[in-house]
Amino acid sequence: MIRLKTVAQMKKMRSSCLIIARLHEELARRVKPGVTTEELDEFAYSFIADHGARPAFKGVESSPDLPPFPGTICASVNEELVHGIPGSRRLEEGDIISIDCGCLLDGYYSDAARTFMVGEVSDEARELVEVTRHCLEKAIEAARPGGKLFDIARAVEQVAHPSGFSIVREYVGHGIGRELWEEPQVPNFVPKFPDFRNIAMKEGLVIAIEPMINAGTYRTKRSRGSWTVTTADGRLCAHWENTIALVNGSNEVLTETTPSFLDE
């Protein structure tokens, strides 16, 4: 678990995260009908390399039944929740695509995800994407030094549940810094074990908050030998993520090109 304690540490985290913030802005311009997920991946690899960084996901190992992850980005379309492998699939009008990516720069990791709408999408798809982003906004508002991880989880629940959508439970946010995945885990739902209510957020903590919201059941599935996680019922899902630092009694959103997208 990283705790930022020096100006130099903060600058390195900001620099790593800014690459991914700018990359997502560029990817947003390139997501359109007819584009393949492999083309998006190739662009992301070049963008990260051109900025002197290394893709965080490429080559990552997870479990014995899986090869190292082959992509720079996770490209997950429609019912695919996370860890979609880039390839020859062409985006079609009405799709939604979640792109998750990160990089390593000067020893510090960054991580962020966005769900993009491809052309005109259904009302359900649009609402799902907007609700998921709103979940992230409210979760970030709740993240403050001295607060509890419970505050983040409750904030997501208070947005997602009234919408009629469900919150994925098997995949959660995480600490980040010198490693891509660090403690603490950052759930988007309130777990039943009582000790969770007492886990504090301290000054200098860096976390990746990432609500994953499904149109149907919260359950997911993954076939043996496949990286890609999908919704269990085949319905749509969305994923938004930002890396944030808890500093100066508040927080700073690191994977946005503005100081904080809460100021928009």
Image (tube, rainbow, N blue to C red):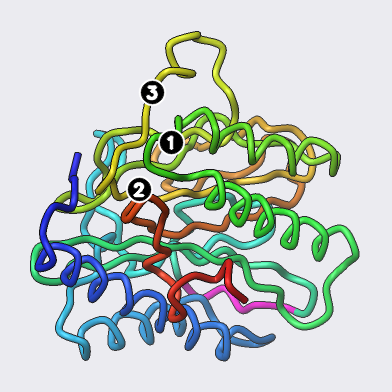
| N-terminal-most mark, 1 or 3 | 1
Looking at the image, which residue is at 61% across and 66% down?
115
Q: Give the secondary structure at mark 1.
A: strand
| Discs 2, 1 touching: Cβ within 8 Å | yes
Does 152 appear above or below 22?
A: above
Q: How many marks?
A: 3
In which image quadrant can residue 231 be found?
top right
| Discs 1, 3 touching: Cβ within 8 Å | no
Q: Is residue 133 left or right of residue 247?
A: right
Q: Is residue 5 left or right of residue 95?
A: left
| N-terminal-most mark, 3 or 2 | 3
Q: Give the secondary structure at mark 2.
A: strand
- Judged by depth in the image, the label closer to the viewer, 1 or 3, is 3
Q: Give the secondary structure at mark 3.
A: loop
Residue 95: percent from left, percent from top: 73, 70
- Which amino acid type is shown beneath numbered disc 2? Ile
> What residue is pinned by disc 3?
199
Please tell me the numbered disc located at residue 186: 1
For label 1, the crowd category at 10 Å Cα-Cα, with few meaning under 14, some 14 to 19 and many 20 or more, is many
Q: Write down the region rendered in magenta.
A: 87-92
Q: Is residue 193 left or right of residue 65?
A: right
**Quarter of the figure with the N terminus:** top left
In which image quadrant can residue 248 be found?
bottom left
Viewer-closest of 213 and 81: 213
47 within the magenta span:
no
> What residue is pinned by disc 2?
207
Residue 166: percent from left, percent from top: 73, 36
- Which amino acid type is shown beneath numbered disc 1? Val
Looking at the image, which residue is at 50% across and 37% down?
223
For label 2, the crowd category at 10 Å Cα-Cα, with few meaning under 14, some 14 to 19 and many 20 or more, is many
